[in-house]
Image (cartoon, grey):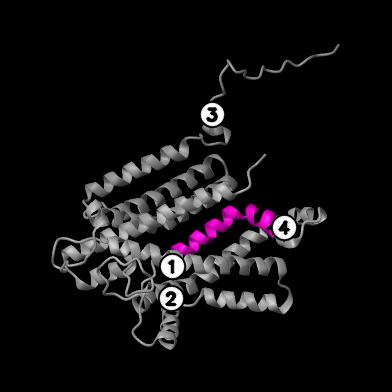
Amino acid sequence: MSTTTTQPPAPGPGMGSPRINLRSGTLPRRFPAALLASCAAVVAGVLLAFSSFGFLLWGVLTAVAYVVIAVTASARVEGGRKAKDRLVTSIVYMCFLLAMLPLASVLWTVFTNGMNRLDIYFLSVSMNGVLPSMDAGGAYHAIVGTLAITGMATLISVPIGVMTAVYLVEYAQGRMKQLLMFFVDVMTGIPSIVAGLFVVALWMVLFGPGHTNGAAGAIALAVLMIPVVVRSSEEMLRLVPQDLREAAYALGVPRWRTITKVVLPTSAAGLTTGIMLAIARVIGETAPLILTAGTSAVSINWNLFDGQMMNLPVFIYSQVRMGGAINYERAWAAALTLILVVMLLFFLARMIGGLFAPKAR
């Protein structure tokens, strides 16, 4: 006589999901979020009770309390292995927040201090005829100088950097490749003041002492940009699958056309990002521009080869050096303007990279 065992029916869509039990060895899915909110509220209440509330102290104590309680609860309910996993996960999130804290603090400080003076008037007038103590003037001449100098530096460094990266990836071999990579790495670590001194010495040899202009500043920034463009472009070109190159070669396409029609379009988005990183690296440089572009320009100058040219980093430096509440406000507003310019350039670069990137069929 055979016996049959009846299995309980599995919960269907209309029967609802089974309820989570703490004794089943798994914490509820919403437990971390609820615990974090509870720890934040309790720690805030304790700090307010002792009149010692501060955002940094509140964040640190909340994180410590959350990690201790979460790991303890996980060890008791889920076991030691899951508790270790939650501990490492919590440490990773804490490290991420610590890394983001300085960035958020800088952005918030610059935004709160720069918005007091940043307006259309500040962005559309120069400091021509404005005394340091006057509550007038703006940074239009510095914005023009920053865009002109950085633009010329980009036109110089991007072709040289990208073509050098193409040579290193597609053509160079043996000791020549190792030697070029060594010098590129050395140039990456050159201090910016050294690049400025190099251009000052070059300008003195060519034109004599005292010739400072925007072109000299652009060349100094290009010296700093080239190694960054080379290294970032090299890494992006190496990410292009070798199968794409071999497929083009199998069809009889020459190497130069394979590079221009296959390799470069495939890595267009990454190349654009690398170029923008290089621009962001130099757009805030002050020391080489003080030596090469000058510090006393107060009027709008569109000619890179005629006279001194003001730029936002040097404008910030000069305003802080003069001191005074009004000059400090101009410096903060110029700093916020510089951040907005960098953000706008990154946005445009993303759009350009998306246009030139290969489309999925």
Q: Which mark is residue 20?
A: 3
Determine whether 317 is above or below 97 in the image.
below
Determine whether 355 is above or below 276 in the image.
above
Q: CA distance from mark 1 to mark 4?
A: 32 Å
- Amino acid identity at mark 3: Ile
- Amino acid identity at mark 1: Val
Along the horizontal axis of the image, is 3 left or right of 267? right
Residue 282 rendering spot, x and y as whole percentages? 43, 67
Q: Magenta region's main secondary structure?
A: helix
Q: Residues within 10 Å of mark 3 (few under 14, many from 20)?
A: few
Q: CA distance from mark 3 to mark 2?
A: 60 Å
* Residue indicated by mark 2: 192
In the image, the segment drawn in magenta is 258-280
* Residue indicated by mark 4: 258
Work out which residue is located at the far top of the displayed protein and give it. 1
Dots 2, 4 in contact, CB < 8 A:
no
Determine whether 156 is above or below 45 in the image.
below
* Residue indicated by mark 1: 282
Decide which of tag 1 and tag 2 comes sooner along the chain. Answer: 2
Residue occupying the point 24% across, 56% down:
122
Dots 1, 2 in contact, CB < 8 A:
yes
Q: CA distance from mark 1 to mark 2?
A: 9 Å
Q: Nearer the viewer, residue 121 or 108?
A: 121
Work out which residue is located at the far left of the displayed protein and give it. 134
